[in-house]
C-alpha cells in the first residue's frame, strides 16, 4: 500500500514537471514565431508599462503628423495661389507702366485697359482657389467662395476666421490667409479690384496722375502679397522642422519599443532547442518511470 502511494506521487510529480516543461516550450515557441519577448503583462510588468506609454506617445505623434501633413498641403496650395496673385499684380503694374507712355494712341490705351479689366476676373479665379472642395481664402467658411465672379469683388461679409491646427503639444498654427488680407492690404491703399478699376479708367481717360497713383497702389499690393508669402513660408519651415523632429522621435521610440518587446532571436532559438531537448528527455524518462502495473492488466 505504501509502495503504491509512493509510485502515484512519483507519477503526479512527473506530470507536473512535464506540464511545466511543455508550458516553457510553448512560451519559447511563441516568442520565436511572433518575434516578441513580451507575450503577456506577466512576462515583464515593468516593460509592458513602459511599452504602453511609448505606444501612447506614438499615437499622439501620429495624430500630430497627420495635422502637419494636412497643414503643409494647405500652406503649399495657398503659396501657389499667392504666387499666381502676385503675377496678376505684377502684370497690372507692367500694363500701368506701358500705359503711362504719352505717345500711345487712345486705341492702344483702350486695349491695355481691356487687359487690365480681364485681370480682375483672373484674380477672382485665383482668390477662389480650393483644395479638396475647401476654399483656401474663405476663412472658416471653406464651403463658400470668398469672391463673386459676377461682380468681381469679395463676397460680403468677408469671413476672417482663422483655421488652426495643433502641430505639437501646446503648439497651434493658423494655416490660412483670409480674403480680406489677400485683396485689401492694411492702410489707405484701396483694394485690388478698386485699384484695377481706377487704373482702367485712368488709361481710357489718358489720366497720367491716375496712372501714377495706380502704380503706387499696385506696388503696395505687391509688397502685401509678398509679405503674405513670406508669412506662409515661415509657417512651412516651422512645420517641416516639427515633422523632422517627430520623424526622429518615432525612430527612437520604435527602437526603444523593439528593445523592450522584441525577442533576441538567436537567444530565443537557442532556448527553444534546449527546451525541446528537455521536453523530449522528460518524455523518455517518463516512459521508463511510468511502467505498466498489475492493476493496468486487471482492468
Image: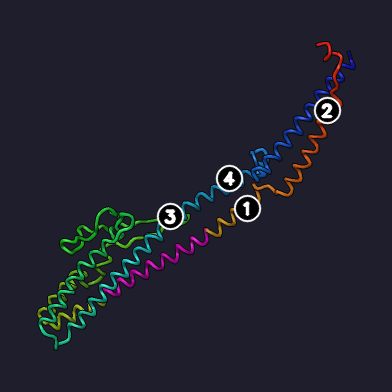
Percent position of residue 256, x then y: 62, 53
Instruction: Say how the picture is coloured.
Output: rainbow
Depth check, front residue: 143 or 42: 143
Q: Residue at x 24, y 67 (%)?
A: 183
| Cα distance between the residues tagged 2 and 3 | 63 Å
- Mark 4 or 2, closer to the camera: 2
SS label for mark 4? helix
Mark 4 and mark 3 residues within 8 Å of each other at the beta carbon: no
Q: Which mark is residue 286?
A: 2
Depth check, front residue: 80 or 297: 297
Percent position of residue 6, x then y: 87, 20
Q: Start and end of the magenta stretch?
A: 220-246
Answer with mark 4 or mark 3, whichever residue precedes in sequence. Answer: 4
SS label for mark 1? helix
Please determine whether, in this image, residue 81 is positioned above or below residue 283.
Answer: below
Please determine whether, in this image, residue 163 is positioned above or below residue 102.
Answer: above
| Cα distance between the residues tagged 1 and 2 | 44 Å
- State the residue position of label 4: 52
- State the residue position of label 1: 256
Q: Name the dominant secondary structure of the magenta segment.
A: helix
Percent position of residue 87, x then y: 28, 73
Answer with mark 2 or mark 3, whichever residue precedes in sequence. Answer: 3
Answer with mark 1 or mark 2, whichever residue precedes in sequence. Answer: 1
Answer with mark 1 or mark 3, whichever residue precedes in sequence. Answer: 3
Please determine whether, in this image, residue 161 is positioned above or below residue 269.
Answer: below
- State the residue position of label 3: 67
Q: Which quarter of the image is occupied by the N terminus?
A: top right
Name the quadrant containing residue 111.
bottom left
SS label for mark 2? helix
Amino acid at each position: 500500500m505504501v509502495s503504491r502511494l509512493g509510485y502515484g506521487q512519483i507519477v503526479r510529480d512527473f506530470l507536473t514537471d512535464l506540464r511545466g516543461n511543455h508550458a516553457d516550450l510553448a512560451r519559447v515557441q511563441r516568442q520565436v514565431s511572433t518575434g516578441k519577448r513580451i507575450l503577456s503583462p506577466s512576462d515583464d510588468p515593468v516593460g509592458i508599462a513602459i511599452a504602453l506609454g511609448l505606444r501612447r506617445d506614438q499615437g499622439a505623434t501620429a495624430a500630430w503628423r497627420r495635422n502637419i501633413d494636412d497643414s503643409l498641403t494647405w500652406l503649399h496650395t495657398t503659396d501657389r495661389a499667392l504666387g499666381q496673385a502676385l503675377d496678376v499684380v505684377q502684370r497690372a503694374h507692367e500694363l500701368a507702366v506701358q500705359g503711362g507712355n504719352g505717345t500711345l494712341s487712345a486705341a492702344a490705351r483702350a486695349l491695355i485697359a481691356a487687359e487690365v479689366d480681364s485681370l480682375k476676373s483672373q484674380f477672382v479665379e485665383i482668390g477662389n482657389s480650393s483644395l479638396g472642395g475647401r476654399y483656401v481664402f474663405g476663412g472658416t467658411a471653406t464651403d463658400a467662395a470668398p469672391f463673386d465672379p459676377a461682380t468681381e469683388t469679395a463676397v460680403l461679409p468677408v469671413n476672417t476666421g482663422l483655421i488652426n491646427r495643433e502641430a505639437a503639444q501646446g503648439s497651434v498654427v493658423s494655416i490660412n490667409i483670409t480674403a480680406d488680407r489677400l485683396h485689401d492690404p492694411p492702410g489707405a491703399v484701396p483694394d485690388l479690384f478698386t485699384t484695377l478699376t481706377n487704373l482702367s479708367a485712368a488709361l481710357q481717360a489718358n489720366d497720367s496722375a491716375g496712372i501714377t497713383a495706380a502704380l503706387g497702389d499696385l506696388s503696395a499690393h505687391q509688397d502685401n502679397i509678398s509679405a503674405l508669402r513670406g508669412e506662409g513660408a515661415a509657417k512651412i519651415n516651422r512645420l517641416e522642422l516639427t515633422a523632422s523632429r517627430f520623424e526622429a522621435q518615432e525612430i527612437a521610440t520604435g527602437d526603444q519599443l523593439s528593445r523592450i518587446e522584441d525577442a533576441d532571436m538567436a537567444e530565443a532559438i537557442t532556448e527553444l532547442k534546449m527546451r525541446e531537448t528537455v521536453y523530449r528527455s522528460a518524455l523518455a524518462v517518463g516512459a521508463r518511470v511510468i511502467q505498466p502495473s498489475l492493476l493496468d492488466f486487471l482492468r
